[in-house]
Image (tube, grey):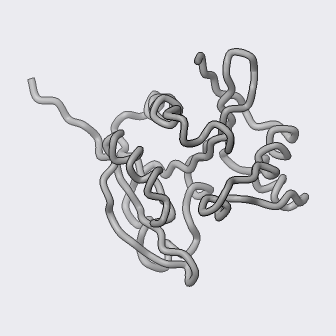
Amino acid sequence: MQLSIQKISKNDAIQILNWKYNAPYDFYNNEESEESIEELLGNSYSVVVDERNQLIGFFCIGNSAQVPAGTHYGAYSEKYIDIGLGMRPELTGQGLGSSFFSFIINHVQAADKSVPLRLTVAKFNERAIRLYEKLGFKKKMEFSNGSTVFLTMVKDVEIYNA
């Protein structure tokens, strides 16, 4: 599968907001509204498409990738590039996550390999956590927004000694 990155369009945002995941991943389901469309269009969201221009998933960086409650717990006090991502529901659980997320990591790090990466994931999402660990992320801290426990995971800069 040949992947590429595009700026998110209104049509992409509408598609993403209408994705429906099966339980327990229905936690990630959204509702389409003008406000949620503007959230995606007005922030650092991009889409990942395949060679046929089919929407595979999306990602965001910076504040958009953070869970607001985490700020209260100091989860985002250190300098990292925060990454958030989502894959089209019918593509999840098929072993595509590693190539999808590796592609995103390579894109983000192309701009600056000296800044480590961080992501936030719901603690129940063991499938995603296994993927992130496989790609070199390590659990950093837990926090709760009152209804869900989240983990931050970090991938530090790899320094090679000659």
The quadrant in which residue 91 appears is top right
Q: Position of residue 108 (x, y in %)?
A: 49, 35
Depth order, front residue of 1/81: 1
Residue furthest to the bottom in view is 146
Depth order, front residue of 120/97: 97
Q: Can the viewer see residue 104 in this picture?
A: no
Depth order, front residue of 92/70: 92
Q: Is residue 4 left or right of residue 99?
A: right
Q: Is residue 34 left or right of residue 66?
A: right
Q: Is residue 88 left or right of residue 15?
A: left
The quadrant in which residue 26 appears is bottom right
Q: Position of residue 132 (x, y in %)?
A: 40, 46
Q: How many marks?
A: 0
Kindly identify the residue that appears in the image at 44 percent across and 75 percent down: 143
User: Is 67 located above or below residue 101 in the figure?
Assistant: below
Which image quarter holds the C terminus? top left
Kindly identify the residue that appears in the image at 69 percent across and 35 percent down: 47
User: Is 62 located above or below residue 8 in the figure?
Assistant: below
Residue furthest to the left in view is 162
User: Is 4 located above or below residue 66 in the figure?
Assistant: above
Q: Position of residue 125 (x, y in %)?
A: 49, 59
Kindly identify the residue that appears in the image at 62 percent across and 56 percent down: 64
Kindly identify the residue that appears in the image at 16 percent across and 30 percent down: 160
Q: Position of residue 148 (x, y in %)?
A: 54, 75
Q: Can the viewer see residue 153 in this picture?
A: yes
The quadrant in which residue 153 appears is bottom left
Which image quarter holds the N terminus? top right
Residue furthest to the right in view is 34
